[in-house]
């Protein structure tokens, strides 16, 4: 029997929902705030919403191409992983904050830790800034 998995379709028809955060909670991305810029997104310069969509699609594509069904995992469920990028655009933390299974959490974290460094960091009013987001990953057979 062939096993397959999918990620949770949440926002804008994308497979990964990312929520920008700072110490005060959720933050909406405005033209003065940008997300980290990965390859294939560098052409988007002025439109913060388009950058956010490209950021989500890049992470979604990476997860879809790298995620494997963990050996011994028998049930479907969801894992929430927080990502923290520093002011240079480097991923400095990927941590499971809620999971239904340790094997699923380890796989989701492994895949997200393998993200390449961003070509440009997130910015707040044009100044490079740290950025954090939450990525929910659903495992389904």
Image: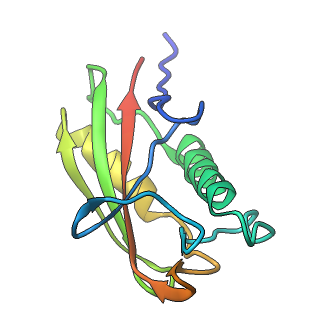
Instruction: Give the number of marks.
Output: 0
Q: Is residue 119 left or right of residue 95?
A: right
Quarter residue 102 falls in:
top left
How far from the left and from the top, in percent, is residue 29? 50, 61
Figure check: 5 above or below 104: above
Residue at x 44%, y 29% (from the top left corner):
8
Residue at x 41%, y 64% (from the top left corner):
113
* Residue sticking out furthest to the right: 43
Quarter residue 139 falls in:
top left
How far from the left and from the top, in percent, is residue 135? 38, 48
Q: Is residue 40 left or right of residue 77?
A: right
Compare residues 71 and 53 and report the one nearer the observer: 53
Figure check: 23 above or below 65: below
How far from the left and from the top, in percent, is residue 100? 18, 32
Compare residues 124 and 56 and report the one nearer the observer: 124
Figure check: 119 above or below 107: below
Residue at x 52%, y 15% (from the top left corner):
2
Residue at x 26%, y 45% (from the top left corner):
105
How far from the left and from the top, in percent, is residue 71? 32, 33
Q: Is residue 61 left or right of residue 19?
A: right
């Amino acid at each position: 029997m062939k096993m397959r998995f999918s990620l949770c379709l949440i926002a804008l028809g994308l497979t990964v929902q990312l929520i920008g955060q700072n110490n005060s909670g959720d933050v909406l991305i405005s033209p003065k705030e940008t997300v980290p810029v990965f390859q294939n997104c560098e052409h988007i310069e002025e439109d913060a919403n388009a950058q956010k969509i490209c950021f989500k699609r890049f992470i979604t594509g990476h997860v879809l191409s790298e995620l494997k069904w963990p050996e011994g995992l028998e049930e479907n469920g969801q894992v929430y992983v927080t990502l923290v990028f520093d002011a240079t655009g480097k991923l400095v933390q990927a941590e499971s904050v809620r999971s239904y299974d340790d094997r699923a959490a380890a796989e989701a974290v492994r895949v997200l830790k393998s993200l390449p460094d961003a070509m440009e960091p997130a910015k707040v009013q044009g100044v490079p800034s740290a950025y954090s987001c939450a990525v929910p990953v659903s495992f389904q057979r």
